[in-house]
Image (cartoon, coloured by chain):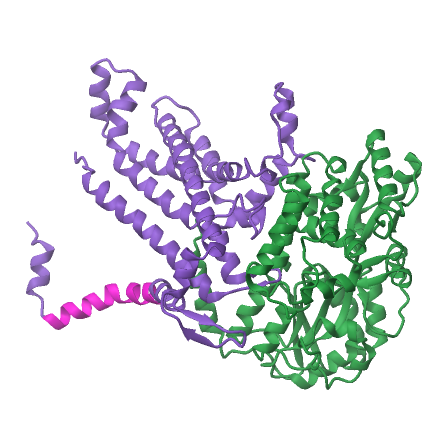
Chain colours: A purple, B green
Amino acid sequence: MAEPISHVTAQMPRAKLAGLLLFFLGPAVVIYSLFSIYPLVATMALSTYTSDPSGARSFVGLANFATLLGDALWSKPFWNALGNNLIFFVVHMCVQNPVGIALAGLLSLPRVRLKGFYRTVMFLPTMLSVVIVGFSWNLILSPLWGVASGALKAVGLGSLFAPWLGLESSALVTLSLISVWQFVGIPMMLVYAALLNIPEELIDAARVDGLGQFRIFFHIKLPLVLPTISLVSVLTFVANFNAFDLIYSVKGALAGPNFATDILGTFFYRTFFGNQLQLGNPTMGAAVATVMFFIILLGLCLYLFLVQRRIRRYAF
Amino acid sequence: MRRTFKAALGAEVAALALLTGLASAEAGSLKIESWRNDDADIWNSKIIPAFNKHYPDIKIEFAPSAPKEYNAALNARLDGGTAGDLITCRPFDASLALYQKHQLDSVDGIKGMDNFSDVAKAAWQTDDGKTTFCVPMASVIAGFIYNKEAFAKVGVTEPKTLDELHAVLEKFKKDGTYVPLVMGTADQWEAATMGFQNIGPDYWKGETGRANLIAGKEKLTDPQYVAAFKEIASWAPYLGSGFQAQTYADSQNLFSLGKGAIYAAGSWDISTFRGQAKFAMGAFPPPQPAGTTDCYISDHTDIAMGINAASKNKEDAKKFLEWLTTPEFATIYANALPGFFPLAKTPVKVEDDVAATMVGWRQTCKSTIRNSYQILSRGTPNLENELWNVSAQVVNGKLTPEAAGKQLQDGLDKWYKPAK
């Protein structure tokens, strides 16, 4: 029987071990530090400065954060963006993930034909550029030339049509659903892969015990893929709170109407890079980015402590 | 959703780190930064070759960015030392900030600068008017472009007053063939720029009102501003169905496909329509409110060019700017891009009839620039951004004209304290 790897490393001379570690981990640590950790730390450092018209920067400590959360001029759009972000996230959690799981469940049924075809078709939008997705849906939903109003009329629901992307009440949910449409392939694929890992014996046993496909899915398969589902949830959380591109490409940096579709990403963009006559404010922008980072960090910590520790993985 | 900010920022830092120091300019070659990516063809096929007839040794590359991203991209490139030699200047504060950060040179020494009036230069000067930092290229005029065939079919003529405009719109609405007025609010700026700033100057008497606003003698809650909002609010019934989701591109398409009668226009739309529309077009200036006699137009100084202070090839850059002040450039630019009107004193013949009509308004009406552009968009909240949001909401019926004026003035009061 082979020796456990820890014994091998323990017997190794220190210098050789250090050399090995450097060889295998060094490049990753360097690249990760340079492109991920350094920008993050630099952003946090920048958020404690302020700049005057000549471009000179001076240290102000946490004043930017005090302004962001304390001054109504900044806090109002900030809370509005955070609230919209939560709605964006909730729509994804309530629509994208259940639909993804359901699709994966259907795909994993034994007697489905053309599995590969469905899988590809449903995953396809994920690979499209967000700009194309935004542009296409803008056209589809356009009250002038869109097919949406015609399609609704054809089934007798023409009166339900509204310029959804232009109304304060519906713009955000519409954009969330467009994003759901694009990314539903990701939970589907992850859950599908997990479902395929479930040993056939378990399913066969359930079938022998007289369970139908529906109950097999709910009582056997679903509990077994819970770890994957929780992973999907946390991925969705991180992606949603970092989201920006779809809103920007469809509604622009002012995220209209009346900031109804403003999320943290567009708020950050407007602050950092500016918009039209508004000049960018990199230090304030860095403060927004730092707050975004902490919101995501807090969400992840809550997840790790409340959810991840309780998940039990089944080994077969 | 997948591409996160952290990745984007990381990439940018990396790009800057790699490129800093590898400044691009070699002797005899110039790079132009611009937001007019629509014009790349014209620069490459007409403007640059015309310049090269005089200076065959100077190689020029026109390197535009997308309009929306221009300011952000340019600022990043200037800070990182990778920007081009010639910088296309936005009017007022965006460029003034670059000058104050010593990223633009003064152009006062350029021969030919006396070919521009003070008004033409005002958008690219320090607040005291002593230093000019960009060479004015063109202004754009707001007004209304209309479909002549539609007017003939319904039997109406160009409206001179707002009452006549409403009568015309009403007729088109009854007729039902055309969308009476083409304008959307999805992009928000249409309502502000082609709505409020288009018909507004007649209410606030152009430059007089603009100067008073800056001096603090008028407020955006005053009747003349509220009245302008009331007017654009009254357009809603005549706009296309679902105008709340109609983007600027939708508006352009709607009109150039011949489905609209009147288009709330900026003169920069002319070249787009020339390429697409198959019908005869005309233009009329903003119709006047009842009881006014003088007319005012938004003749907005929009585009200029300056020298990157960090350029390695300033001598050639100056030669190019000198050429920009000549009537030769003005003539090429005005006719290659109908709707961008030269600012030089030497008169230029404009061939395009719609463009000629619009520039002809300068003879009968007084010119003014958009009132949110100078000084008043320097703070937070930014008056221009607020104006976009508020104007779109007024047209959408979500905000009353009075509340709109109040929101703008409240925002301005937060940071702007004019000397009284």
Q: Which of B67/B300 is in front?
A: B300
Classify A216 as above or below B236. above
Residue B303: x, y in percent?
Answer: 72, 67
Residue B407: x, y in percent?
Answer: 60, 51
Q: Which of A136/A197 is in front?
A: A136
The region drawn magenta spans A14-34
Residue at 56% from the left image edge and 49% from the top image edge: A249
Main SS category, magenta section: helix
Classify A64 as above or below B85. above
Classify B309 as above or below B404. below
Residue at 83% from the left image edge and 58% from the top image edge: B296
Q: Where is residue B376, by image quadrant?
A: bottom right
Residue A225: x, y in percent?
Answer: 27, 33
The mark tally for this picture is: 0
Q: Which of B204/B6 is in front?
A: B204
The verdict on residue A15 being magenta is yes
Position of residue A246 in the picture relative to residue B93 (left or right): left
